[in-house]
Each structure stands twice: as structure tokens, then as C-alpha cells.
Image: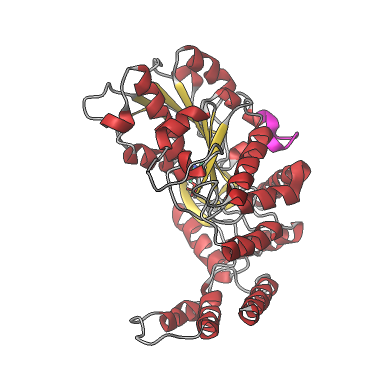
Amino acid sequence: MATLLNRAAQAAAGYLEGVRSRSVAPSAEAIAGLCALRGPLPPEPASPEAVFNLLHEFGSPATMAKTNGRFFGFVTGDCLPAALAASWLVSTWDQNAAHHAQSPVAAQLEQTAIEWVRELFGLPAGTGGAVVTGATMANFSGLAAARHALLERAGWDVEADGLFTALPVTVVVGEEVHQSVVKALGMLGLGRKRVVRVPVDGQGRMRADALPHLDSMTILCLQAGNVNTGAFDPAAAICPAARAAGAWIHVDGAFGLWAAASPEHRKLTKGFELADSWATDGHKWPNIGYDCGLVLVREPAILRATMSIQAAYLVHTEQRDPSNYGPELSRRARGVELWAGLRSLGQQGIAAIVERTVRHARRFAEGLRAAGFEVLNDVVINQVLVSFGTPEKTLRTIELLQAGGVCWCGSTVWQGRTAMRISVSSWATTSEDVELSLAAMFHAAARE
Ligand SMILES: Cc1ncc(COP(=O)(O)O)c(C=O)c1O
């Protein structure tokens, strides 16, 4: 076992050393090489060394080099050294995080990490939550708690009796709601289409003056950090009246809520602390590695009533059992990586990642504007949208940029305009990476 693990450590270290100098996107040859991993399951066993070698030889080259500081696609964090090392240990421990009785360490570290995040976000004392796979499941869990609370007020036990013949719940979202919220609403039987959409401004922020009637049977979904522009809904203008009306306020803050950790950018998150539930990701801005999301609920008893699971064979103690707060029963002890990553950064380190990546995003915007390209958004955090001209020219520039291998950016359509997205979310991105990437963008745009 020790020989195998040493071999794995050596291969992983070699991968990390090489990843900075290789093309960000895998080559066509590397992707073609994946055929070595296909085919029927062989009848005979293979040695762990042989399997590992096969995986490293053909799998590693076919990865996206997203840990090299120059991957700017989607909203993709990296994996901090402490979180990576912790994930090796977590895999070695092979803990089931379902119950305190099955894994005291997993249960304890998860609870501590949740409390750290609550404090970083400035959320009310007593707020609790769960560690889930990502913001999609965090949105699902927060909205499940909302559904429970509203219907309970109306005298209906939705977990016991389902939704058929229950009183209708109205869900209000902004026009620029993230599709993961919409997907979660579909999974919860609240309907992907059965939502009231509030108009937004040019940055994608919900217009506070255009809100519909809200009452105690309404779930209002706000957004802290639009996936394209990074913009924040005006929570301070919306939440007091929404609370007074008895609506449940849910916040999708997959990455944006982490701005609260920075004294410089905290003001953007003002008002979101008035919500009832919050969804966020550890694998985006804090760079915890996949898969790591968090749901937080002002009254954790509601989350517990929504998610709890009992069976004679399951061992419950007086301690907090993670499976009573999230959608899964058995699962990886993913809170350990979250604990380790946050512990290694401390409050200052988290603020530093936020502030550094925002500075990099602003430099991208400034460099692109200076070169004559149109930046479509106000760069309030780490997201930049740029047009290189016509939709065709922008898409062709992105294609050439990705093929060039220096960095990787994706495309989007922002309020009718085709754009390239730059999301600076990695702790590892340096100023040199930004300048190299800007040069690659100019080169791609000139070649088009
Ligand atoms: C605002 C927002 N919400 C939700 C999500 C979904 O997150 P995940 O992919 O972790 O499920 C994203 C992903 O980028 C996002 O930006």
C-alpha cells in the first residue's frame, strides 16, 4: 500500500509541476488517448499499480489544466494545498459523514466549518446548515426548507403528504436567476415555469421597484453574484419589506456571498443577512476543490424537519447528525476539506483571494478596453464580459484562444450580446498570468 500511495503522491506532484507549462485545454491527441480506458470490463483482475499507471498515463493528459491559474471558464475555483492534502486523508479515512456515530471527526469538522462560513458572511447567530455537493444542491436544500416552512404555516405537512392539493406557493425570481435555482424548483415540484419573474437592470440586478405583491406564501429568490456580470440584487432595498410581508427569502450566493469576507467588498452583500436561507459553494471562490457546497438556514430546525431521516438501524445520538440536515444519507466527509482550506487561509487569506481576484478582473477589463474592445459589465467582483465585435468575431476569438492553450475562457449571451466570459476565481492566478492571458486574447482577436 505504501509503495502505491508514494507512487500516487509522486504522480500528483509531477502533474502539478507540469500543469503550468502545458496547454490549458487538453490536446486532441490526449483526448483520443482516452480510448485506452474504454472497452469492456476485463474478466481478470489487474494490480492496483497497473490501474493507477493506466489512469495517470492516459487520464492526466486529458484533464483540463484548471489548476494552473489561467483557467477562467464558468466560475471555477482551484484546490488549495491544505484542501488537497486533506482530501487525500479523507479518502484514506473513508468516513461516512452520515452520522456522528459513524464519523465523529466528519460531523465535528463540518459543523465547525459551517459556523466559520456563517461568521464570514455575517449571518445571524444560530444559523445552521449542511455541506452538500454544490450550489445546485444548496439551492435545492434551502428551497426545500422554504417549501416546508410556508406550507407548515398553512397547516400542511409537505414531507408527509406531498404537494398535490396543498395551497399554492408563489416563487419570485429575477429575470437573470441562475438556472440551478430553476432546476431546484423543478425537482421540488414547485415548477420550473411556475415562477414570477422580476425585471432586471442592465447588470442583471432585480429591480426593487418592480417587485410583485409578496406574502407569507411567497418564496423570494435573490442573487448575490450574477454568473455573468457578478452583480448583486439590491438586498438592502428589498429584504426589509419582504420580511415584513412574511415572505421566505432565499439567496443564491454561489460565489458572491464570499465578498462578505473582504472589508473592501463587503458592502456588496449588505442586506442579504436578512434572508432565511443561503446557498453557496466552497469549490468556487474559496478554492476548496470539488465537490463542496453549503446550505445555511436561519432556523436550522426547519432544515432538520425537511431533511431528517430515521430508521431503526440508523444510530442517532444527542449529537448533530449531518444526514438530518442535507439531502443525502451516506456520503463523503467533504466538510473536512472545507475545514482544512478555510483553516489554512484564515479570515485574512479568504479576504486576500477575493481582493486579488477582483484586482485581476479589473486589470483584464482595463487591458481589454485599452485595446479597443467593449467590456459589457461593471466589474464589481471577479467577472468580466467582453465583446470582440460581431457575435461571429467574438466566438471565433474564443475558439482561437482556447486552441492557443495559454488560457481558457468560455462564451455567453448577455442580454442579447454574445460575449466572452472571464471569471477569475483561482487562488493561483498571478499578475503574470493575467498579462500572458491578455496578450493571448489580443493575439486571438488579431488572428480572427
Ligand atoms: C450564481 C450561481 N448559482 C448556482 C450555481 C451552480 O453551482 P454548482 O455548479 O456548484 O451547482 C452557479 C454556478 O456557477 C452560480 O454561478
Q: Residue at x 61, y 54 (%)?
A: 77
Q: How many numbered callouts?
A: 0
Residue 381's place in the image compared with 266, above or below, is below
Q: Residue at x 65, y 78 (%)?
A: 2
Is 263 in the magenta? yes
Q: Going by the image, does 405 lie left or right of 436?
A: left
Residue sitting nearer the eye, 402 or 206: 206
Q: Residue at x 48, y 38 (%)?
A: 325
Residue 41's place in the image compared with 360, above or below, is below
Residue sitting nearer the eye, 263 or 329: 329
- Is residue 138 visible in the rendered image? The answer is yes
Bounds of the magenta span? 259-267
Residue 158's place in the image compared with 437, above or below, is above
Is 252 in the magenta? no
Q: Residue at x 42, y 85 (%)?
A: 45
* The furthest residue to the top: 244
Q: Position of residue 371 (x, y in %)?
A: 66, 53
Q: Position of residue 129 (x, y in %)?
A: 54, 36
Q: Position of residue 62 (x, y in %)?
A: 51, 74
Residue 188's place in the image compared with 155, above or below, is below
Image quarter for residue 141? Answer: top left
Image quarter for residue 44? Answer: bottom left
- Is residue 378 visible in the rendered image? The answer is no
